Image (cartoon, coloured by chain):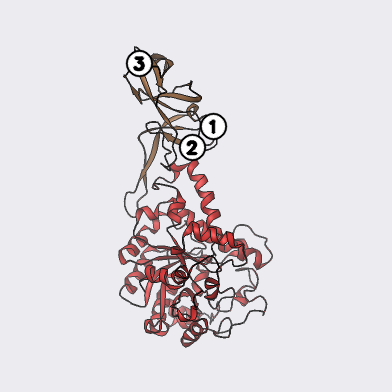
Chain colours: A brown, B red
């Protein structure tokens, strides 16, 4: 998730001008030895390791959507389904999907893609590769 | 190792060899009269006869090889006192009786009231003639689940009867499958009554259980009993029955245990790729399914021990229920549990009786 803190830090990796991102766009950068995807969704920036824990696919290059959620409406009623508030990215290889905010798999929160802090300063997007 | 004969043993699946002729006496009109005038007689008890026609491949008694000393099956309807005789033979203290004839209900496709009439008659017949809690003979009430109202009527009828301790759903032929919201009112009522739902596999229609053309019962019985239970496990789990009715105890009966790890592993793989299609689940389907209880019969004792150990480990020995299936052709005696080398004595006692005591309140 993006923040405005400490753009002068040594650990920041420059991604590019914020204005070049539309919602759903991603940019891949190297952070140390890791490939990280920076994704914009609903005007916010998120960064996740670009390696799906399933089969190593480029998860951050996949489509960004709202999670489809269901709710029990009562005995005998059809389960309601609607797109919720959570933005997710789906690995284009097999569809494993993760919350952008937390990196958690939407079906099993024990599975997680590492997330990174995103900093936007002076219109430029950075990933914080620090601890 | 424990001495099973000295321990309490609860058999969660004994098939009372009910006959149409006897149950008809308790059927509501107009079915009582229709039956009397129909010439149906006991048909259905003798599966070797029915299997000659394409309701089920092959002869269950393996063409005269399998005989039963402590039951009239398969030649004549059972006599109630022979149940206790058979239980003594197997050193079983408590048995749960499941209708033999109802296993064919999945083959009924007509929109008539055969199944409703039979199940209503059956619960009365069993109460009057067979079930006897003082002797350890309890029953599961068969659900004519295609008709939700009739199912609720049966639950209402048996609610205060000590002799009934759960509801039985035959898994073959259920369409839509049993996770469908159509059946919610039955599950809701069972949860309210603290009645376990026992899904029992069935073999009707096995000639074409998925495709026509099999030749022998070894093929269709192996596959059909698995498919019938697996199809309902997938439906019940994916449609979120355990989330809708969290206090409902779910039991699957009579497909052994080795299919469970394979099924849940495959289902989990699918789920992780498309979890939004099972939107009521908070986690992998396997987490729900391994909370179900499983009747162990016919236990695959010829399998590698490490495979059986894996099954018990994945599902939990606290979820396994001994079931004999007596007097059917592939019954298990309690020794199949007692002889398992990977169990300790507490686990043996739990599988032979303790788990059933807890689920069925015995």
Q: Are marks 2 and 1 in contact (CB under 8 Å)?
A: yes
Q: Earlier in the sequence, mark 1 or mark 3?
A: 3
Q: Earlier in the sequence, mark 2 or mark 1?
A: 1
Pointer 1 indicates a residue of which chain? A
**Rendering coords of residue B33 (x, y %):** 44, 80
In the picture of the structure, the residue carrying the numbered disc 3 is: A7
Residue B244 shows in the view: yes
In the picture of the structure, the residue carrying the numbered disc 1 is: A57
Pointer 3 indicates a residue of which chain? A
Is label 1 in a helix, a strand or a loop? loop
- Above-or-below relation of B69 to B55: below
**Rendering coords of residue B135 (x, y %):** 40, 84
Q: Residue, x 53% and y 59% (percent of image)?
A: B311
- Above-or-below relation of B319 to A59: below
Same subunit: marks 2 and 1: yes
Q: Residue most toward the top?
A: A122
In the picture of the structure, the residue carrying the numbered disc 2 is: A96
Quadrant, the N terminus of chain A: top left
- The Cα atoms of the two marked residues, 3 and 2, are separated by 32 Å
**Rendering coords of residue A93 (x, y %):** 54, 33
Residue nearest the observer in this picture, B161 or B354? B354
- The Cα atoms of the two marked residues, 1 and 3, are separated by 30 Å
Is label 3 in a helix, a strand or a loop? loop
* Picture quadrant of residue A97: top left
Q: How many neighbours does mark 1 have within 10 angstroms: few (below 14), some (14-19), or many (20 or more)?
A: some
Q: Residue, x 41% and y 85% (percent of image)?
A: B129
């Amino acid at each position: 998730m993006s923040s405005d803190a400490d753009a002068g830090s040594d650990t920041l990796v420059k991604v590019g001008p914020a204005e070049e991102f539309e919602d759903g766009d991603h940019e891949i950068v190297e952070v140390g030895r890791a490939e990280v995807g920076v994704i914009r969704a609903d005007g916010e920036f998120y960064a996740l390791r670009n390696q799906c824990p399933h089969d190593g696919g480029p998860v951050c290059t996949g489509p960004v959507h709202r999670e489809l959620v269901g709710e029990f409406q009562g005995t005998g009623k059809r389960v309601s389904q609607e797109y919720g508030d959570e933005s997710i990215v789906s690995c284009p290889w097999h569809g494993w999907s993760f919350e952008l905010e937390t990196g958690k798999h939407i079906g099993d929160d024990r599975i997680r893609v590492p997330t990174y802090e995103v900093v936007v300063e002076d219109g430029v997007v950075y990933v914080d590769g620090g601890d | 190792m424990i001495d099973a004969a000295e321990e309490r043993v609860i058999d969660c699946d004994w098939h009372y060899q009910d006959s149409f002729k006897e149950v008809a006496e308790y059927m509501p009109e107009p079915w009582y009269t229709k039956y009397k005038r129909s010439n149906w007689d006991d048909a259905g008890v003798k599966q070797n006869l029915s299997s000659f026609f394409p309701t089920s491949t092959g002869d269950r008694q393996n063409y005269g090889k399998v005989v039963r000393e402590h039951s009239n099956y398969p030649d004549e309807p059972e006599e109630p006192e022979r149940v206790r005789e058979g239980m003594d033979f197997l050193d079983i203290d408590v048995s749960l009786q499941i209708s033999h004839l109802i296993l064919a209900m999945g083959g009924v496709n007509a929109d008539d009231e055969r199944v409703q009439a039979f199940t209503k008659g059956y619960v009365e017949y069993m109460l009057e003639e067979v079930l006897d809690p003082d002797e350890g003979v309890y029953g599961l009430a068969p659900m004519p689940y295609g008709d939700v109202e009739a199912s609720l009527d049966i639950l209402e009828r048996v609610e205060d009867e000590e002799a009934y301790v759960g509801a039985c759903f035959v898994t073959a032929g259920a369409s839509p499958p049993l996770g469908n919201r159509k059946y919610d009112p039955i599950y809701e009522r069972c949860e309210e009554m603290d009645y376990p739902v026992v899904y029992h596999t069935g073999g009707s229609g096995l000639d074409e259980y998925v495709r026509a053309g099999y030749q022998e019962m070894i093929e269709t019985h192996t596959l059909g009993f698995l498919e019938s239970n697996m199809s309902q496990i997938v439906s019940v789990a994916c449609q979120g029955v355990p989330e809708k009715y969290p206090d409902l105890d779910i039991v699957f009966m009579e497909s052994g245990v080795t299919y469970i790890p394979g099924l849940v592993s495959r289902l989990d793989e699918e789920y992780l790729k498309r979890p939004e299609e099972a939107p009521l689940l908070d986690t992998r389907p396997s987490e729900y399914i391994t909370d179900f209880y499983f009747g162990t019969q016919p236990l695959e004792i010829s399998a590698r021990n490490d495979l059986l150990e894996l099954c018990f480990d994945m599902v939990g020995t606290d979820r396994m229920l001994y079931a004999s299936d007596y007097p059917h052709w592939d019954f298990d005696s309690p020794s199949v549990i007692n002889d398992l080398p990977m169990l300790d004595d507490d686990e043996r006692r739990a599988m032979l009786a303790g788990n059933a005591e807890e689920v069925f309140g015995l």
